[in-house]
């Protein structure tokens, strides 16, 4: 299994920015989809941004124009640049990979432990 480790969370004032990083422990044969999710206390986990094979990206409506997902394939890194943060976006942010280990292998899915983002008003 691939290990995913997030970093970059912290405390920021409303309107501020943070850049989250997700480091994968090794390369995967093929990545189907990479994404960032968030989960606030008592809330369901929700998709923030995702990047799929072929380069397509999708964002939650609430973050469009403020958040940007990107990757560095050579470094096995996934990033989330978050600008103009709002207090209601306080949550644990988790990265997620869906991938294959071989041409005809089953699909695997891994989650990181998450990084806390707290936005103060």
Image (spheres, rainbow, N blue to C red):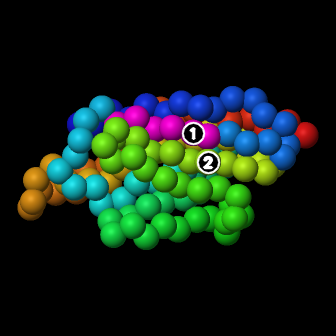
In the image, residue 44 lies at what x, y percent? Answer: 61, 52
Residue 20 magenta-drawn? yes
Residue 20's disc is 1
For residue 107: magenta?
Answer: no
Mark 2 highlights which residue?
Answer: 81
Residue at 59% x, 32% y: name it: 8
Q: Determine which quarter of the picture holds residue 7.
A: top right
Against 49, residue 24 (above or below) is: above
Q: Counting other residues with Cα less than 10 Å from the Cα at mark 1, is it few (<14), some (14-19), or many (20 or more)?
A: many
Q: CA distance from mark 2 to mark 1?
A: 6 Å
Residue at the right extreme of this rendering: 121
Could you tell which of marks 2 and 1 lies nearer the N-terminus? 1
Q: Residue at 73% across / 42% down in the picture?
A: 17
User: Which quarter shows the C terminus?
Assistant: top right
SS class, disc 2: strand
Magenta portion: prevailing SS class: strand
Q: Which mark is residue 68?
A: none
Q: Please indicate whether residue 98 sits to the left or right of residue 58 in the image.
A: left
The answer to which of 104 and 16 lies nearer the viewer is: 16
Which quadrant holds the N terminus? top left
Quick one: 88 or 56, which is closer to the camera?
56
| Relative image position of residue 70 (x, y in whole percent) | 49, 53
Give how far across and how far down residue 118 sits, in percent.
Answer: 74, 35
Q: Residue at x 24, y 41 (%)?
A: 27
What range is drawn magenta here?
19-24
- Total marks placed: 2
């Amino acid at each position: 299994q691939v290990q995913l480790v997030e970093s970059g969370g912290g405390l920021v004032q409303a309107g501020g920015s943070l850049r989250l990083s997700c480091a994968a422990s090794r390369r995967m044969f093929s990545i189907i989809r990479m994404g960032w999710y968030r989960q606030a206390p008592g809330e369901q986990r929700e998709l923030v941004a995702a990047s799929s094979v072929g380069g397509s990206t999708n964002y939650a409506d609430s973050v469009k124009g403020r958040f940007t997902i990107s990757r560095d394939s050579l470094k096995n890194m996934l990033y989330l640049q978050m600008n103009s943060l709002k207090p209601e976006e306080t949550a644990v942010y988790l990265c997620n990979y869906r991938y294959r280990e071989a041409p005809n292998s089953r699909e695997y899915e891994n989650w990181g432990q998450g990084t806390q983002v707290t936005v103060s008003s």
